Image (spheres, rainbow, N blue to C red):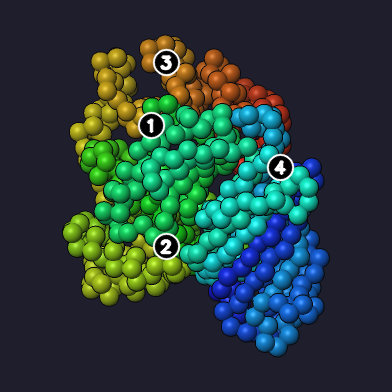
Amino acid sequence: MTRLDPHSYADLDQGITQSLTLMLRVDFEAKRMFGKVRLHLRQPSSGVFDLDTRALEIAGCRTGGGAEIPFELGQADPILGTRLRLQLPAGTQDIEITCATTDASTALDWLAPEQTAGGALPYLYSQCQPHHARSIFPCQDTPRVRFTYTAEVTVPDGFTVVMAAAPAGATPGPEPGTQTFHFTMPQPIPSYLTALAVGSIASKDISDRVRIYAEPEVLDRAAWEFAGVGDMVGVAEGIFGPYEWERYDMLMMPFSFPYGGMENPRLTFLTPTLLAGDRSLVNVVAHELAHSWTGNLVTNATMEDFWINEGFTVWAERRILEALEGPDAAALHAAIGRIALDEAFERFGTGSPYTQLKTPLDGVDPDEVYSEVPYEKGFLFVTLLERTVGRQQWDAVIKRYIDEFRFTSITTEELLEFLDRELPGVLDTIQARQWVYKPGLPANAPVFVSQRLENVRALAGAWEHGKRPSLEDVAGWKAEEWQLYLKWLPREIAHEDCALLDRRFGLMSSGNYEILVNWLILAIRSGYEPALERTRGVLTTVGRMKYLRPLYQALLARPEFQAFAREVFDGMRDRYHTLSRVTIEGLFDKAGV
C-alpha cells in the first residue's frame, strides 16, 4: 500500500478520481443529506480501492454498468475517519455509491431559523478543509487528488442552493414541493474545496464577474462593504497573472461560521464579522482572493505542506494591499501578523515541531495544531526570498511557479526543487532549510519599518511613562493602528485606565471586531467587569474561532470570570460550529473548569 498523505486512506496506485457527480437531497427535519456519488477514475482499475469516509452510512456500491461492488467499512479512527474498501471488478472505471450523512458529520453545520438573520428558514453550510469532505461523500480526501465535478442538490421549495461551482440552473425536483439546483465545476479541485450552502439566500452583482450572496436581510450591507472587490481582482491579476476561475463570487455566512473566510473557488465564504460598516476589514477578502492563485491553483499536497498555501497567500494578500493602500498599510499588517506568530510560538513552546514550516503530522489532527505559523512564518520566508533577489526577479519567478504547477498539488520538496532551479544558490544563502525544517524563527527574518508603525509603537511605549492617548494622538488612525496599539499596551492596566480608554474612544461600541475583540481581551485580562456584558454579546453572536478562542482564554485565566465563561459557553454550545465547540471545550479542560 502506498499512502502518500497521513490524513487519507487513499492509495493512488489503486486508481485516481478524475471526475465525480454528486446527487444530494437535503432533509432539514432529519438534518441529513441523502444521495449518491459517482466517481469516474482516470483509468480502469480492479481489486482493492480505498476511499475516505467519516460518519457516513453506506447503503450500496455499484459499477457504472450496474454490477454490485463488494465493500467493507473499517474501524473508525478519530482522525482519519472510516476506510471504505471496495473490491472492484476488473476494468472498473465508474463507481456509484449510495450514502447518507449522519449527525456526526464534521463538515456540515445545520442552523435553526433563529440562528439566521431572517429567522424564517433553517440554514445549512459545509466546511470541508482540511479533511472533512469525507463526512459528506466518500472520496479520496487528499489534496493530491484533484477532480472536476457536477452536482444536483434537491431542496424544499423556498430554499436556494449555492455551491463553489458554476450555477447551471434549477429544475422541479423529483417530488412535489421540491426543486433541484444544478452546478458544474470544470476546473480540477481537491476535495476540501467542495462547498455548498442552503437557505434563504439572495444575490447582487458588484461587477461583471463579482457577485455577493447573502441572506436578504444583510445583502445590501454586504454589497456596500465589498463594492471594491471587482477592482481588487484586477489588481491581483496585474501581479500574479490571469484569474483562471471565471468568476469571483462571495457568500456572506451566518454567524457560526468558524473562520474569517474560506477560499472555495468561485464562491468564497466570508464571516459576517467583516461587516464593519467602514470597509476596514476588506483585507480578509484580499487573502481569500489571493488563494485563487496560491492555494487553489497551486495547492499543498498534504497538510504537512500547508504553509505552501498560506505563506504564499499571506505574502500575495499583502502585495495586493500594498498596491491598493501603499507600503505603510502592508507594514502594519505585517506587524500584526508578527504578533500573532509570536503568540503561536508561545502557545507551542520552544522547539515544537509545530513551529516548523514543513510540519510532521502523522497521527496528528491538523485542526488541533492549527495556528498562524504556516501563515506568518511562511509569509516571512517568501518575503525573504523576494528581498534577496529583488522584486522584479521574484515576481517573474512567481509567475513561472504558478504557470508550472497550475491545477496541481505539490510537496515542500517539489517547491524547494523548483526554487533551487530558478534561483541557484539562493536557498543556501538564506538558509532555507533551517526555515523549513527547523522550529522557531531564524535570525534573518525580514523586519518591516514605516512611519505609521513607529508612531503607534512610540505611543504604546509611552504608556509606562504615564502617557495616555488623546484624540489628537489617534486622529486618522485606521483599524490596524488600533489593533497594534491595544496589543502593545501592558497585559493588564488599571481599571480607571480601562474606563478612560473606553470613554475617550468608544472602544466598547466599535463595529470593527478586530478593534473590539482586542479591547475586550485587554479589559478582561485587567479584570475590568464592565466589559463582561459586551463580551457576552460577542460570544453569543460571533462564531469565528479567531475571536472565540482568545476571549474564552482571557476569561478562564481570571478565576472571578470563570463562572461567567461557563455560563455563556453552556448556553452557546449547540450553536457554535463543531470545530469551534471542540476548540473551546479543550480550553475549559485545560483550565480545569
Q: In this view, does 15 lie above or below 474?
A: below
Residue shown at 73% from the left, 75% from the top: 85
Amino acid type of the residue that numbered disc 2 sits on in the rendered structure: Leu
Q: Quadrant of residue 68?
A: bottom right
Q: Mark 1: few, some, or many residues within 10 Å (few <14, many ≥20)?
A: some
- Between the residue at mark 3 and the residue at mark 4, the CA separation in whole angstroms equals 45 Å
Please report the residue visible at 38 percent of the width from the left and 27 percent of the height from the top. 278
- Report the side of 153 relative to 416 (left or right): right
Distance, label 4 to label 2, CA atoms, is 35 Å
Counting from the top left corner in percent of width and height, residue 462 is at 28, 23
The residue that mark 3 highlights is 506
Decide which of 154, 340 is in the foreground and name it: 154
Q: How far apart are marks 1 and 2 (CA)?
A: 27 Å
Nearest the viewer among 246 and 395 is 246
Q: Mark 1 points at which residue?
A: 279
Rendering coords of residue 218 (x, y %):
53, 30
The type of residue carrying mark 1 is Arg
Mark 1 or 3, which is nearer the eye? 1
Residue type of the residue flagged with mark 3: Gly
Residue position for label 2: 297
With 215 as the anchor, is 374 left or right in this view?
Answer: left
Comes first in the chain, label 1 or label 4: 4
- Where residue 230 sits: x, y (%)? 36, 44
